[in-house]
Image: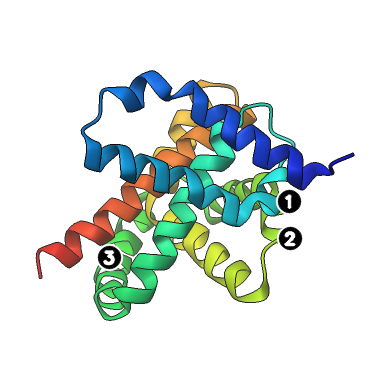
Amino acid sequence: MGGPVSSFRMLIDLERSEWIDFKKELCKADRQRFDRLFSVPKLYHYASSNLSNPTTIEPIILSLIFNNFKIVHGTLTTSIQIENNNIKDEDFQVCQSSKESEIEIQIGFNKIIQDWNKFIECLNEDDEFIFIKMISNCYDRYHKSINSSIKENSDSIPSRHFAFIMALILYQQKQIDSHLTK
């Protein structure tokens, strides 16, 4: 019998088939991009299978975001470092005036790490470092938004996951936009 790795690879294919109507409406070039997107999560299938998540799309999206982060980080290192330096100064000032205490911020960050720990544990050392850096940088910038959306939903894990995923997408888009304007 197949282990969790085989099962999750099959779940990726099943999730992909759920998007068939969406894919049909795309132009040919976008259909090819769509197929490439769904091949990326298979690179991280072992880590994703350890999340024990009832929704398959969540680890798939996380894999896509992480892979894109690695691509952006690898090809845009200089731009990202410049952006990170500029943003950290601005965010630090915002954090100082925030009503959240440092302890609340750390607790929120620790919850995010706990949520994704099974994924992190299955990455190689380099990817683990990059993934934690991605989480840390994103949470530093968007913790107020993430935590405010969670409070409304009783700190449930799904709402925390989706709030964090949205923050990751926003963080990544900000990096891409920053590179494109230079």
Task: Report the disc number at residue 121.
Answer: 2
The dot on residue 1 is none
User: Along the horizontal axis of the image, is 118 left or right of 109?
Assistant: right
**Secondary structure category for the residue under label 1:** helix
Residue at image mark 1: 118
Q: Residue at x 62, y 67 (%)?
A: 128
- Spot occupied by residue 6 in the image (x, y as percentages of width and height): 75, 43
Residue 90 point in image, percent of width and height: 26, 63
From this view, report whether residue 75 is shown above or below residue 99: below
Q: Secondary structure at mark 2?
A: helix
Query: Could you give the CA–CA distance between mark 1 and mark 3, rounded to whole angstroms?
Result: 30 Å
Q: Residue 132 sits in which quadrant?
A: bottom right
x, y percentage for residue 52?
74, 36
Horizontally, is 84 left or right of 44 in the view?
left
Asked if the residues shown at circle 2 and circle 1 are in contact, with their CB atoms under 8 angstroms apart, the answer is yes
- Spot the residue most to the left: 181
Residue located 44% across and 47% down the image: 143
Q: Quadrant of the N terminus?
A: top right
Residue drawn at (32%, 43%) of the image: 32
- In which quadrant of the rendered image does the C terminus lie? bottom left
Query: Relative to 107, is 64 on the left or the right?
Result: left
Separation of residues labelled 2 and 1 (CA atoms):
5 Å
